[in-house]
Image (cartoon, helix red, strand yellow):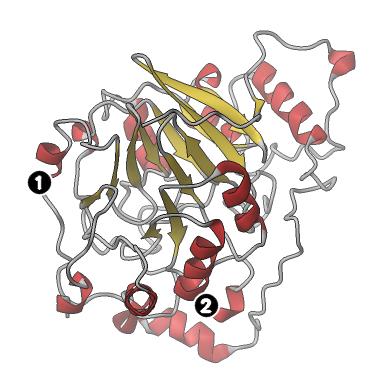
């Protein structure tokens, strides 16, 4: 297979030393990464560099990051029916039976993918991406809850199908944004204590998110933060791919006082033979078509389909619009993520998968819907909607 030329992308690398103080273009006070959730970064120099880059970002609006188009949350704070559904509707939204997991993952991952590309869905938005000799992990979440505390918040429907220790070589982790169901602090603490010995320590994430990671203990030199349109290279024993930050339509924050102080991003992985797009969390945007035209064609795109509601239509896709985004990108296959692990919305836990399945059948489209822990490669098919067997 011939190699694809890499597109011209601004390569983002961390500078070796601080620029002189008079050259720093810092955002206007207050410090956007000071409080509450991003405080405590141990490296003052990397913090100043980060602030300088935030101040220069076209996405920075003076006090916070913004989307290309304005977003609107249509939730009525006085809608008591919605509040009651959130509080008492759990039995409707959670599976009553056991979700089946694929458990032969280690055997499957013991050799390289036959066609140079393999994706293994580990639940929610966590996917092991093996592409052209490089192994990447998206938004790793092994924690019991998607929550800032261990005693409350959405609990997992199922255990992780693979232990961190059994991941094997991970050349870099790709982190789309800082929400608790994507940036899982308990998982990162385990990683930093050696729970995944094959991890290189490298992270590629959205601009500003490195402050959280440094606070947790990730070395600043191992963190690459991307603004939209910037890229970086990941190398592994002679193999090489480029990771590019791309627009998404969402928001960020880990508390009531830090909304949009860090950026959110999609991440495109461009190899010499294959290309993969990971949407992170996003609402519908015409920029998906632009990404497909400028960085594609993609072998597979990973779009979120779960944890959605019409009131959140500008920041989450849901299955119908995930399919529309997939079609607009001209990609060969769709792997739906962000469903089946946590109760984060008001719908039945499998509704997004069922809706997407019916669309894919009607459109005769290549949509990969493996069991959690399952792997897919180019040309893969899923023979049955496995979630229907879960009571």
Image coordinates for residue 289, horizontal then vertical, percent: 61, 57
Task: Say which of 65 and 288 sits in front.
Answer: 288
Residue displayed at 39% across by 75% down: 363
* Dot label at residue 277: none
Q: CA distance from mark 2 to mark 1?
A: 35 Å
Dot 2 crowding, Cα within 10 Å, few <14, some 14–19, many 20+: some
Q: How many marks?
A: 2
Query: Outermost residue toward the front?
Result: 2
> Element type at marker 2?
loop
Looking at the image, residue 336 sits to the left or right of residue 35; the answer is: left
Q: Quadrant of the N terminus?
A: top left
Q: Which mark is residue 309?
A: 2
Return the disc, 2 or 1, that comes first in the chain's sequence: 1
**Quadrant location of residue 304?**
bottom left
> In the rendering, at what x and y percent does residue 28 appear?
87, 37
Extreme-right residue of the structure: 22
Above or below 309: residue 170: above
Whether residue 40 is visible here, answered yes or no, is no
* Residue 148 can be seen, yes or no: yes
For this view, does 223 lie left or right of residue 158? right
41 shown above or below 377 = above
Q: Considering the image in quadrants, where does the C terminus appear?
A: bottom left
The label shown at residue 104 is 1
The front one of 114 and 56 is: 114
């Amino acid at each position: 297979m011939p190699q694809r030329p890499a597109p011209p992308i601004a390569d983002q690398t961390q500078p070796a030393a601080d620029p002189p103080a008079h050259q720093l273009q810092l955002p206007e006070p207050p410090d956007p990464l000071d409080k509450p959730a991003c405080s405590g970064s141990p490296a003052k120099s990397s913090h100043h560099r980060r602030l300088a880059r935030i101040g220069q970002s076209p996405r920075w609006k003076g006090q916070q990051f913004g989307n290309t188009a304005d977003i609107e949350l249509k939730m009525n704070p006085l809608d008591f029916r919605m509040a009651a559904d959130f509080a008492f509707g759990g039995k409707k939204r959670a599976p009553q039976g056991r979700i089946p997991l694929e458990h032969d993952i280690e055997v499957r991952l013991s050799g390289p993918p036959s066609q140079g590309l393999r994706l293994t869905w580990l639940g929610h938005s966590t996917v092991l991406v093996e592409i052209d000799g490089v192994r990447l992990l998206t938004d790793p979440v092994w924690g019991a809850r998607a929550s800032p505390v261990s005693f409350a918040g959405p609990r997992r429907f199922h255990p992780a199908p693979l232990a961190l220790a059994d991941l094997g070589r991970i050349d870099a982790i790709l982190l789309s944004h800082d929400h608790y169901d994507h940036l899982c602090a308990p998982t990162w603490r385990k990683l930093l204590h050696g729970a995944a010995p094959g991890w290189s320590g490298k992270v590629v994430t959205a601009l500003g998110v490195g402050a959280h990671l440094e606070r947790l203990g990730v070395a600043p030199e191992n963190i690459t933060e991307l603004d939209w349109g910037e890229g970086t290279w990941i190398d592994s024993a002679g193999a090489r791919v480029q990771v590019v930050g791309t627009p998404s339509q969402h928001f960020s924050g880990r508390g009531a006082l830090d909304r949009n102080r860090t950026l959110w991003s999609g991440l495109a992985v461009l190899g010499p033979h294959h290309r993969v797009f990971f949407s992170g969390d996003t609402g519908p945007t015409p920029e998906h078509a632009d990404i497909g035209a400028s960085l594609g064609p993609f072998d597979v795109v990973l779009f979120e389909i779960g944890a959605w509601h019409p009131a959140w239509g500008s920041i989450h896709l849901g299955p119908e619009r995930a399919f529309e985004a997939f079609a607009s990108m001209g990609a060969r296959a769709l792997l739906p993520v962000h469903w089946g692990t946590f109760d984060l919305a008001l719908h039945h836990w499998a509704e997004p998968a069922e809706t997407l399945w019916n669309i894919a059948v009607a459109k005769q489209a290549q949509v990969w819907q493996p069991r959690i822990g399952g792997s897919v490669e180019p040309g893969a098919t899923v023979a049955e909607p496995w979630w229907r067997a879960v009571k």
